[in-house]
Image (spheres, helix red, strand yellow):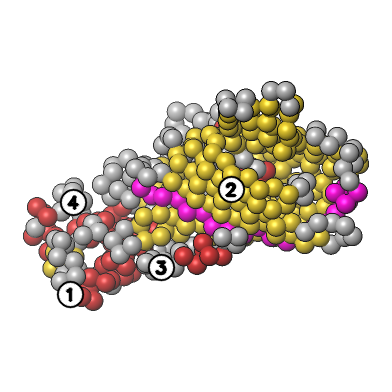
Amino acid sequence: MRSIFGVILLLGSGAVWPAVFLPPQDLVCTGEQTKTHIGRLQPTDEAQHVDKTLLAAWALDTYGIRRSYEVAVEKRPDLMLDTSLSPSMEILEDEHFCKTQEAPEGKFACTGDDAKVISTAHLAFRRWLDGNDPNYNFSKLDKDRPHNYFGDAKATIYCVAKSDSPPKKTQDGPPKTESMLSHLRVRGTTDGLGYDQGDPGFKATPGASFSVNRDDVSDKTTNKIVGVLGYQLFPHSNNSMDFEMVPYFGINRNLTSAKGKGDTVTANTRNVGIYIDFSFSNSKFDHVFTVRPDYLTDIQHHSNIESLGFVYQPFVLGWLNTNLPFSTSSESIASVMPILDLRIDTGHYNNCGTLALDKCANYTRIGSQFGVSINSNNINQPFTFTATDTRLIGMTDRAHDIDYLKYVLSYALNKDKSVSLDFSYSDGRREDTAFEERLWGISLGVKY
């Protein structure tokens, strides 16, 4: 299928989209405050956190769940998931709480209408735990069991400060400093350099890929490496704005060596640049603006391109560029992230090398990248599927239009999904060189 629209349309079947779960901080938070943001998560050891008892009580009040069900739980503690939970926590956490004709496996008798209300509250609560509410920091939840919140004594959700005051020092001294390696970034494309490892968008970001194929019959070897290495500098964050710079080096090399026939080059480029992004926030949206000056060398054709890219990406909680749960009637089986940005690319060839004139034209292009990423919530099936289509219209003479489609299916080889086995397909003109490409591949993916 040439377009990703069919993939997006398939997501509508069999899904239940629960009501929005947005607990107000003044009713559920306790302790000192910290600051965070959709893009950057920075908890402190003494940060203000969600009180689990207050959260469960707020949920029952908000969704209109009758107190008689709490009494029912108190009378039958033997049916509880965990006897250490309060009745209100039990109602919210147990997906098989209600027993009805449609759900005979349930534990407590519920009317049909009450069962729907409790199910809606339960699914909305699980969706909230996926970590997309910018008013809270979910980085301290167990990645393997994010929905076991009430039953896990170590699970903590931090509350985001609404003031610009810095976090206070602890009794043991100043806050802990970050490791230098925490600023290192290894990604598959420059577009992924803006995500920290704790961000929801990190899962959808392709990793650097490495593959080696050997054909003993034809006596040829194919080596492929595609990736970007960057390092974050000067990160700055306050309550409404973030800023960062990431100098980077990129490589795209696809080379086949055959005995007696020399090398066949599909791609052989190097590029250096600086990824600069500004993020502005309010209560519901993040607006991320990216500027990316870049210098690319095409070793195959001995040409050079100086370019400047601009990208605007809106983050709309529960709708766009953030994770949404994809649910069956009983559980959230995956997270779905709709992807959309607006972009402008300008480029100047200061050396055409051996390129034909029609492939060596200065350009200005305007368009968008859009798509979808699906991330499995099942730790036994750690798949991530990402489909993107980059479409840019040439605004100058001889500037090629860009229509670059890419699918990546990744199977994670470790818990944080930073190492994976990737199955990929790409088709169209590359955004950086406008060269046509149509590739299938299996490779080892790494991102950090």
The answer to whether 58 appears left or right of 207 in the picture is left
Q: What's the CA distance linking mark 4 and mark 1?
A: 21 Å
Pick the residue in front: 321 or 284.
Answer: 321
> Are discs 1 and 3 less than 8 Å apart at CB?
no
Q: What's the CA distance linking mark 4 and mark 3?
A: 31 Å
The image quarter containing residue 14 is: bottom left
Q: What's the CA distance linking mark 4 and mark 2?
A: 44 Å
- Looking at the rendered structure, the secondary structure element under dot 3 is loop
Q: Which mark is residue 425?
A: 2
Pick the residue in front: 210 or 175.
Answer: 210
Query: Which residue has dot 3 on it?
Result: 13
- Looking at the rendered structure, the secondary structure element under dot 4 is loop
Query: Which residue has dot 1 on it?
Result: 111
The answer to whether 305 appears left or right of 228 in the picture is right
Disc 3 marks a residue whose amino acid type is: Ser
- Looking at the rendered structure, the secondary structure element under dot 2 is strand
The answer to whether 393 appears left or right of 33 in the picture is right
